[in-house]
Amino acid sequence: MSDKPDKKILFEKFNKKIDDLYTFRDKYFILNESCTNPEDRLRELNIKLDSLIGEIESETENFESKAIYLVLLGKAYNVTPDFSQKSFDSLTKCLKLDPKLVDGWNYLGECYWKKRDFKMCKNCFEQSLKLNKNKLALRGLSMVIRQLITSEPKNTKNLIDESIRLAKESLQFDFKDGMSWYILANCYVSLFFSPFGQQNVTILKQAISAFNQALKDESVAQLQSDLYYNKSMISMYEENWSDVLNCLSKALNLDPFWHEVKDNLKGCLKFLSNIQEMIKTKGKLKSKKFQSLIDEIQKSDLGPYVGSYQTEKEKIELSQCNLKDLKPGLNTNKVLVGKVICTLQPKTTDAENLNIICFTCCIADSNGDCAALTIYNLAIGDGVIIGNSIAIPEPWLERVDFKFNLRENLKNQTILNEISDNMDFEFKFDSIRVENPSVLVVKGKKWGKDKVSSAFFVPKVVQD
């Protein structure tokens, strides 16, 4: 009687145990909310890993081949967050014995990813695909191709396009696979913020849609802290502040010792609180100074926007307005003019670690009403200062209005205390969003294209 079925069962048994070990690693902080030391996870993970390796080694002679035994060892050792030499050595030996083992190439590709050797990582996934089209290799290749942009900047557009194609192809194997959707979302984010994406709204919507599809897969939604981090950055660009805070909280619950996420959550709460405070206190200016500023607002501050404005395509009629005249969204045929009453860059607001990509200030109109002003794609070093007049044609109004309870969203008590003494937040203010700085008129003069740069954001991708 053939013993091959038993050997197959043995492989599946240990493969399942290794998968469970990966789940233990990813869910550790969710299941241990009181954890105060990030080393606890690694210590317990290594204990379980050593035990599992012992079990696998005790069955060395019972596997279908030495290569199968080694690929299991390689996959198991690769559970550690950083590069594992033992995993690398096991997989290298495995592929010398059986170079047609698809899983061996995929796991070795992940080793090279952790080693930051993207050229060899790419080679591994390509070898896997030559043997058999599979979603793990397609996803891995999609990720690593985007890492080559730094070394091949002239080929950026082709690399991003190829990355998108590969991610889409991986979805053909399983349309509901959350990891494939997540990698596709990151591809769209890369394209959106590249010079070739030109911050096209359609691409942004595709990224958000892909993120939302990824979150429908619980195996991804419950494990991938970097997914929530990346989605928070897109939501920050959209000024969807409620989603930013929710995403950062979820990322921190999955990995409470990820300092960048903690800094962003803390900085975001501080940043929003400062905006609200500065609007409420009218930039903390003395009454006489504030009144003097808004009394200075005059028709000449409109610059070329007096009455109408000729664009490259058409003549636009514009009527001067104040904040109370605006509705949420685009306000066509209107031009808002006001005075800058304060600037709110993170480094000047105790939110210096906030990964924000716009210039922020507060303005007051001739009625004395105040709002935030966010200017995107502004060249580094440029901006406005207190007292500058500023005219904004066809302004886009965002109405921020939501509540956020820190205790309800964060599970780890130690991290909770590090974020803020305040647990309940309520944000309610208006904000004007400007995508193109060159449309602004500052001190009566229209800004030129020299004021325009491009926002840049690299998704925080982690492959396990």
Image (cartoon, rainbow, N blue to C red):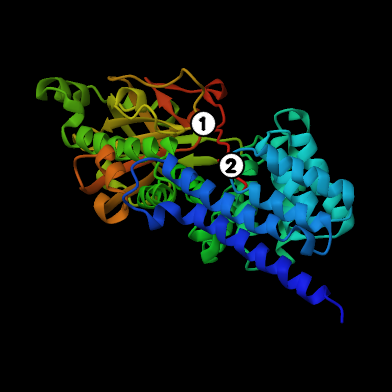
Name which residue type carries label 2.
Gln
Q: Is residue 362 left or right of residue 163?
A: left
The image shows residue 335, relative to residue 252, as above or below, that is above
Q: Residue furthest bottom?
A: 1
Q: Residue furthest left?
A: 287
Q: Gap between marks 2 and 1, in whole Å?
A: 10 Å
Residue identified by numbered label 1: 377
Please provide percent x and percent y for residue 54. 63, 54
Q: Is residue 106 left or right of residue 363?
A: right
Dividing the picture into quarters, in which one does residue 189 lie?
top right
Sequence order check, earlier mark of 2 and 1: 2
Residue identified by numbered label 2: 199
Asked whether 259 or 15 is in front, the reply is 15
Name which residue type carries label 1.
Asn
Please provide percent x and percent y for residue 321. 31, 40
Asked whether 223 or 29 is in front, the reply is 29
